[in-house]
Structure formats: structure tokens, C-alpha cells
Image: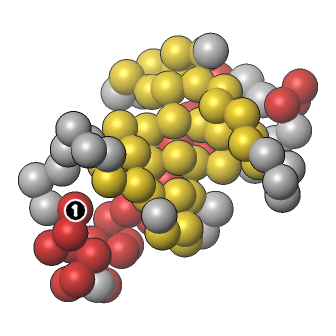
Amino acid sequence: MLTSNSTDFLLESEGALRVYVHSSWWIGNTDDQKALADLSRGKSTLSYLISNSSEFAAIVHGHEPKYSLIYFDGRDAVELATFDGDTVNWI
């Protein structure tokens, strides 16, 4: 797993690139608008890493990113939502 800009990247065995974006808000204060802003940060981080690291780009090439919003308190993480395009699917 690689973490950059509060975003975790993990290659799953079935070939997907899991992108876990850390919520910038406490669980009770998260809503669709805030989740989409965090998703934008996650997508920008992925683009940045691909553009600036040929090794990272080679590793993730051909792997479809699947985005999730998580809340991480420094010890434990909870998945809050998945994204289907710009649709937030709350868990």
C-alpha cells in the first residue's frame, strides 16, 4: 500500500486499483458535497503520481481505479462510501 496526500493506493488480486480517500471531515459532518471534494483530491493525487513517477505509472497501468471514502482516526479506518462516477454511495 502507498499513501500520499491522505489517499491510500492498493492493488487488489482481481486487478482493480483501490483508491481509499481519507475524509477531511469527521464522520458526522460528512455529506455529498464534502465527499465529492475529497474524491476530487483523490483523483488529483492519482493523476499527480502517474505524471511524476514512471514506476508508479507502470505499476497501475491497466488497473481500473475504484474509489472509496474512508474515515481514519489514526488507528482504525471505516469505509464511509464508494463512488460511481460522481455519485456517492453511502455505506
Q: How is the image coloured?
A: secondary structure
Above or below — where is 78 with respect to 40?
above
Identify which residue, 10 or 32, lies in the foreground: 10
Above or below — where is 37 with respect to 62?
above
Identify which residue, 90 or 37, lies in the foreground: 90
Q: For the point 53% across and 46% down, which residue is it?
A: 20
- The answer to whether one can see residue 37 in this image is no
Q: For the point 10% across and 53% down, which residue is it?
A: 62
Q: Looking at the rendering, in which quadrant would you find the C terminus?
A: top right
Above or below — where is 29 with respect to 43?
above
Q: Position of residue 6 (x, y in %)?
A: 64, 62
Q: For the point 32% across and 45% down, which residue is it?
A: 12
Q: Secondary structure at mark 1?
A: helix
Residue 50 sits in quarter? bottom left
Name the residue beneath numbered marker 1.
60
- The answer to whether one can see residue 56 in this image is yes
Q: Amino acid at mark 1?
A: Val
Above or below — where is 44 with respect to 15?
below
Is residue 4 left or right of 72 when viewed as pictured? left
